[in-house]
Image (cartoon, grey):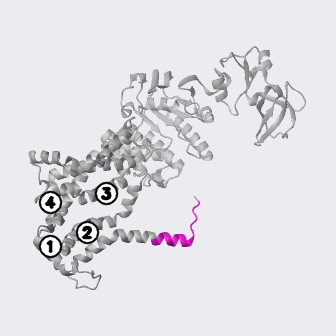
Amino acid sequence: MENKQTPLGHIGFSIFAWIVGLLIFFPIFWMVLTSFKTELEAVSIPPSFISFDWTLENYAEVQARSDYFRFAMNSVILSVGSTLVGLLFAVPCAWAMAFNPTKRTKDALLWMLSTKMMPPVGVLVPIYLVFRDWGLLDTRFGLIMVLFLMNLPIMVWMLYTYFKEIPSDILEAARMDGATLPKEIIFVLLPMAVPGIASTMLLNIILAWNEAFWTLNLTTADAAPLTAFIASYSSPEGLFWSKLSAASTLAVAPILIIGWFSQKQLVRGLTFGAVK
Amino acid sequence: MGAIRLEKVKKTFGTLDVIPGVDLDINDGEFVVFVGPSGCGKSTLLRLIAGLEDVTDGKILINGVDVANEAPAKRGLSMVFQSYALYPHMTVYNNIAFGLKMAGESKAVIDEKVQNAAKILNLTDYLERRPGALSGGQRQRVAIGRAIVRNPAAFLFDEPLSNLDAALRVNMRLEITGLHQELKTTMIYVTHDQVEAMTMADKIVVLQAGRVEQVGKPMDLYNNPANKFVAGFIGSPKMNFIGGDYAKKHDCHEIGIRPEHVAVSTESGDLPATVKIAEHLGAETYLHVNAGGFGPMTVRATGEVPLGEHDKIWLTPEQDRIHRFDANGIALGKL
């Protein structure tokens, strides 16, 4: 493809991209910065940029006031758990849609995705009542179910686009070789789809990790993940900016690090099939 | 042992009759080629036999047992795909061994069979490689290896050579023919290339629009095509068809004469013609000519013929090689 770019245009684009990137990154940067300030400096106007007394006392206090690791452990269990349960359902579902499509497959996919368009608050009351009556409130199991169901459409959709790229000849060859359906999926389809499955898992762990609506509404203590941990710092006592920032930094750090190391995988997963 | 019999095998996709009903007998050890233009249903027919498509109606008997409703693996057939369809994440060894593993064979048996297949196919040095590190011809051999080890009742080949370049294709053609002579197992081979059909087959099945046009030995189809379609499809370059008065002289609607059965002379003959294009191949020369009222024709002259554009020549069809067809394109037999 001919796509000539003048050096000047190239520089212009680079500058633009950097500006956008910094704009997106700035709130996170500011949050990390604030977490090292005292409460007084955090609200001072004009804000101090680098020249303030760096302190770790916010982190110490946050850890002392609430058990970070318990919340973090819940976050890990909920995000990884919901993703694994999701895979159990999404893989066969995407297999069926990719390799045995019917006239209605596209409609079914679109319908599944359309459930994501509804505001979650619309089903809050029924789900809350179900949780209350079944004793699922503030349980990890209950939340895993909600998070898994919430992300299932995206998992199916992502895996479907991946599976579509796998030549069906290879699966037919496995069938001729005597593989039963489970063996065909486990020994042939899954190993070939590892990159797609990895990025699907990654995205869903991130989505589940960051999910705040259901985790806040359906938990109190036992199953509360890091989202609840952050929320507990914007509390009746008033806003404590630097402690809130410290808590938020602690909450986003793990997922940020995972995301940083796997960004290549993630980008490939999200754009798969879009360009050939 | 692998005798296959199709009885009124039908396949419809929605309202589309892909295979309206095929009857066919394939004897044990035969090399049968399904040939026809693209979209004629030859691959679908093969996939029906393999079990990768469900039959709409009819019976598929393998050694006398109806397998039409059996899973592919239960039919005891092996298939080689056009795209090779190797498992990209497995080594050559594991690719070949996969079917045996699925059948629950012991490690020792698997190893013996894989090594044996690798020896036959010259793959011994490549067993630890992955398909991505192999050339097209080697990949094709792995696909064949995977088929051989299962010791099938019959091999099914779905246009296995169409992804290879011309030189390699000729080699693989010979290898597959050699393999058939060695193994003496029934083989069903699908191709759109009539040269492959002619050179490899014991029996050719010519298909068009899901119907069997003719079944026979290669030379039978060449010498006695049942209709105009088969006459035009088998043989290269294509048979010339001439209607009008020249056909009336032979008491039919249209005659067909192969390019190699027309004598070329610069002095005298039946039909006057002008050369449009001459293709000099050394061993033979194809002349694309304009034969006056008979329209364009192709004739083949052996050896080097010093003819070129605008040269006037005379053509004389060999009378005992003329095929006669009625208005429906059905062969009438020779005069």
Q: Are marks 1 and 2 on the same chain?
A: yes
Upstream in the sequence, badge 1 or badge 2? 1
Does residue B153 show up?
Answer: no
Mark 1–mark 3 Cα distance, whole angstroms, equals 28 Å
Q: Which residue is mark 2?
A: A253
The percent position of residue B164, horizontal first and vertical second, equals: 57, 46
Mark 4–mark 3 Cα distance, whole angstroms, equals 21 Å
User: What residue range appears in magenta?
Assistant: A2-15
Mark 1–mark 2 Cα distance, whole angstroms, equals 15 Å
Q: In which chain is the residue bearing label 2?
A: A
Q: Is residue A184 above or below residue B332?
A: below
Q: Is residue A39 left or right of residue A255?
A: left
Upstream in the sequence, badge 4 or badge 1? 1
Q: Is residue A266 above or below residue B215?
A: below
Q: Is residue B239 above or below residue A156?
A: above
Residue at 23% from the left image edge and 80% from the top image edge: A44
Amino acid type indicated by mark 1: Val
Q: Which residue is mark 3?
A: A203
Mark 4–mark 2 Cα distance, whole angstroms, equals 18 Å
Q: Which residue is mark 1?
A: A62
Q: Quadrant of residue A215?
A: bottom left
